[in-house]
Image (cartoon, rainbow, N blue to C red):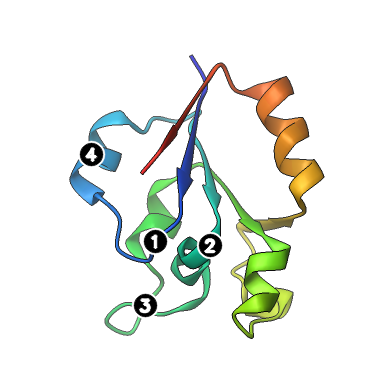
Amino acid sequence: MKLGIFISDFKYDAELFNRIADDETGVFLVHDGVYNAVVEDNGGASPLINKASRIFVLREDLKLRGFTEDSVPSNVEVVDYGDIVDRLMEEYKKVIWL
């Protein structure tokens, strides 16, 4: 089962994430969740960036918070609303929000 996880806050439930995420999990960073893609945690990338297999960050939310696409690590894909909808409909069987 391919699971899509929306994260909308910089501080998310890491314990729950670790229990449910697997190699096919896609993470969608929206709202304040985009900080996980651009803000360093103790001198390094957010642990989330290294734990998820596919990570998407919403372009509009990134720009609203003053970041550019160049701020995002290479393993994070910057997408628009339409891209998120397409991926959810085509690739993921279940979606949750953390």
Mark 2–mark 3 CB contact (< 8 Å): no
| Residue under numbered circle 1 | 9
- Front-lying residue, 40 or 82: 82
- Front-lying residue, 91 or 84: 84
* Residue at screen point 55% across, 57% down: 30
Mark 1–mark 4 CB contact (< 8 Å): no
Cα separation, mark 2 vs mark 3, equals 21 Å
Q: Is residue 95 above or below residue 79?
A: above
Q: Amino acid at mark 1?
A: Asp
- Where on the picture, by quarter, is residue 87? top right
Q: Counting other residues with Cα less than 10 Å from the Cα at mark 2, is it few (<14), some (14-19), or many (20 or more)? A: some
* Residue at screen point 36% across, 44% down: 98
- Residue 61 percent across, percent down from the top left: 64, 67
| Residue under numbered circle 4 | 16
Q: Is residue 21 above or below residue 90?
A: below
Mark 1–mark 2 CB contact (< 8 Å): yes
| Residue under numbered circle 3 | 44
Cα separation, mark 4 vs mark 2, equals 20 Å
Q: Secondary structure at mark 3?
A: loop
Q: Amino acid at mark 2?
A: His
Q: Amino acid at mark 3?
A: Gly
- Which is more N-terminal, label 2 or label 4? 4
Q: Amino acid at mark 4?
A: Leu
| Residue under numbered circle 2 | 31
